[in-house]
Image (cartoon, rainbow, N blue to C red):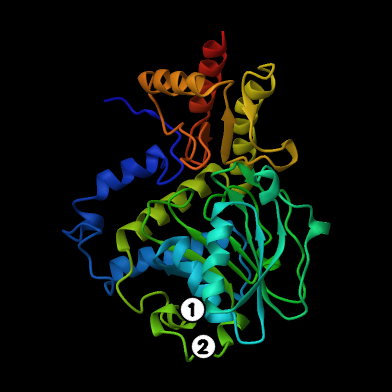
Amino acid sequence: MERVYNFNAGPSALPKEVLERAQKELVNFQNTGMSIMELSHRSQAYEDVHNEAIQLLKELLSIPENYEVLFLQGGASLQFSMLAMNFLQEGKIGNYVLTGSWSEKAIKEGKLIGQTAIAASTKETKYTSIPSLDKLTYQENDAYVHITSNNTIYGTQWQSFPTVNHAPLIADMSSDILSRPLDVEKFGLIYAGAQKNLGPSGVTVAIIRKDLLESNVDHVPTMLQYKTHSETNSLYHTPPTFAIYMLRNVLNWVKEQGGTNTIAAKNAEKAKIIYDAIDESNGFYSGHAEKGSRSLMNITFNLPTEEDSKRFLANAKDLGFVGLNGHRSVGGCRASIYNAVPLEACVALRDYMISFKK
């Protein structure tokens, strides 16, 4: 079967070159006589892959020396609990900006650990936008301020990030990490499930400022302490070795593309093609997100009627488009155009949108 146009929201498209490299190395990795999946995580061959992945991420995101890169498991969903366990101490407040379903899930887990507050929310407008920076309300005793940088379900994305001086800024960047240059120093902790821009599902990346590792977390289970993984180079227990190997390969691919500046320009070009099709349709296609908050990763839109949407999606499937259904909670359509989605897929979708309208 030919490769389809993959617009899945996650797990999502991987670069073809990365898949072909994995295919070539799958049975006999670097003349070890074993697959990367069979190697001991204590072997030199695997540790070289592991350490290269860390160094590549530091290079591509210009991560300062006072930050650690950790490889964890459990996805962003476990991070919702883990960050609160490590930082939300008695007398402190976990302050959350609500911009969609994932931030709602984050604060829900925070409430199980300690006191929380809402710094801002756009729920009343059905999460069509990101709050303006001057609308964020902080508390004197904030343990941290938490944001979700990109909202896959609603198709909104932070265009610029708040400057928070009184507490660590923590960001769930699962769906847009590595899609653009990033000022890591704005954040105390960045975490991201890999399955959108970094690699396959199974590994979670955390970028944490070293001073935050000094918190007293003796009450937290060992596996859920960030310092456990920092002190052992993320090798405290058996890591998801194949997922980290694939992440390493994706990072090499991003470097070969020219880094995050080049990737960001390509992502903007891809998104413009589809957003133009929406904006020039005279209302036939209507975007969910307000223009100033539009995501370059997840483009959400509706057609005039639910029946039109069903026909659009059914015809698209026949033409080789995959993953265009909107999230079950909001319906409509969604095109997820992460780093590995090629320009020609976006052009093909634009052309289909125009022909379907006609």
Label number found at residue 217: 2
Please tell me whether mark 2 sits on a helix, a strand or a loop: loop
Residue 138 at x, y percent in the picture? 77, 70
Q: Quadrant of the C terminus?
A: top right
Asked whether the residues under the numbered discs 1 and 2 touch, taking CB atoms below 8 Å apart as contact, a structural biologist would say yes
Farthest-out residue, right: 134
Q: Quadrant of the N terminus?
A: top left
Q: State the separation of the CA atoms marked 1 and 2.
A: 9 Å
Seen at 36% across and 19% down, the residue is 318
Q: Is residue 136 left or right of residue 155?
A: right
- Numbered circles on residues, count: 2
Label number found at residue 226: 1
Q: Is residue 146 above or below residue 243?
A: below
Q: Is residue 332 left or right of residue 293?
A: left
Seen at 61% across and 33% down, the residue is 271
Q: Few, some or many C-alpha atoms within 10 Å of disc 2 (few <14, some 14-19, many ≥20)?
A: some
Q: Is residue 165 visible?
A: yes
Q: Quadrant of residue 68?
A: bottom right
Circle nearer the N terminus (1, 2)? 2
Q: Few, some or many C-alpha atoms within 10 Å of disc 1 (few <14, some 14-19, many ≥20)?
A: many
Q: Is residue 45 left or right of residue 350?
A: left
Q: Is residue 173 visible?
A: no
Please tell me whether mark 1 sits on a helix, a strand or a loop: helix
Amino acid marked by disc 1: Tyr
Q: Quadrant of residue 153?
A: top right
Of residues 123 and 286, the one nearer the viewer is: 123
